[in-house]
Image: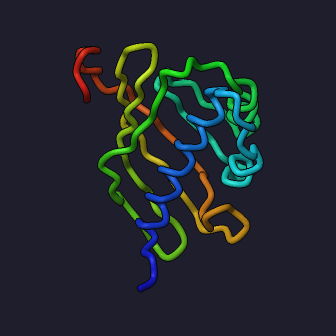
Amino acid sequence: MASTLLDIATREIVELHEFFVRWFVDDGSPAPDFSRFEKAMAADMTMIPPEGVILDRAAVVEHVRSARGKVAGDFSITIEDVWSAYEDENSILACYVEVQWRNGQWSRRRSSVLLSKNSSAPLGVEWRHLHETWLQAPNASQAP
């Protein structure tokens, strides 16, 4: 059975966030291949983080590159509630919730990402636009 674009998008979102955890936390094992991240970002990629600034691809790549090993080992990311807000034969606007555990605190953000097919990207889709919005974080002692 062929994967749907939503299946591919979900896998891409989850795998890229798994890369982030391995990249941001230096646990002594070899660093993951940074080109995996770079190849997934479209040349004209833009990002709007929760703070509201607009970042181009170069700023996003440099931010991630410079964050290698900068997060304490007590860090995790899970992805929840992935759904398609729009899709056509070549692209999908996927929405999801990113849940982070860092420094004994939970945070959550709702994200939407425009992914387009590109056979040279790691999973065949590239990130074109990402927009993140903070959600109210639950009590730090409770799981989200």
Where residue 1 sits: x, y (%)? 41, 86
Picture quadrant of residue 62: top right
Point out the image quarter for the C terminus: top left
Q: Is residue 144 left or right of residue 93?
A: left
86, above or below 31, in the image = below
> Measuring 40% from the left and 37% from the top, which residue is drawn there?
98
Residue 100, position as x, y percentages in the image: 41, 29
- Left or right of 43? Residue 55 is left
Snapshot quadrant of residue 73: top right
Identified at 60% across, 68% down, the residue is: 117
The location of residue 105, given as percent across then percent down, is 37, 16
- Residue at image coords 59%, 20%: 71
Coloring basis for residues: rainbow
Q: Position of residue 77 (x, y in %)?
A: 45, 35
Question: Where 52 falls versus 17 (above or below)?
Answer: above
Task: Please give the count of numbered marks on the rendered protein.
Answer: 0
Farthest front residue? 28
In screen coordinates, is 2 left or right of 82?
right
Residue at screen point 35% across, 40% down:
97
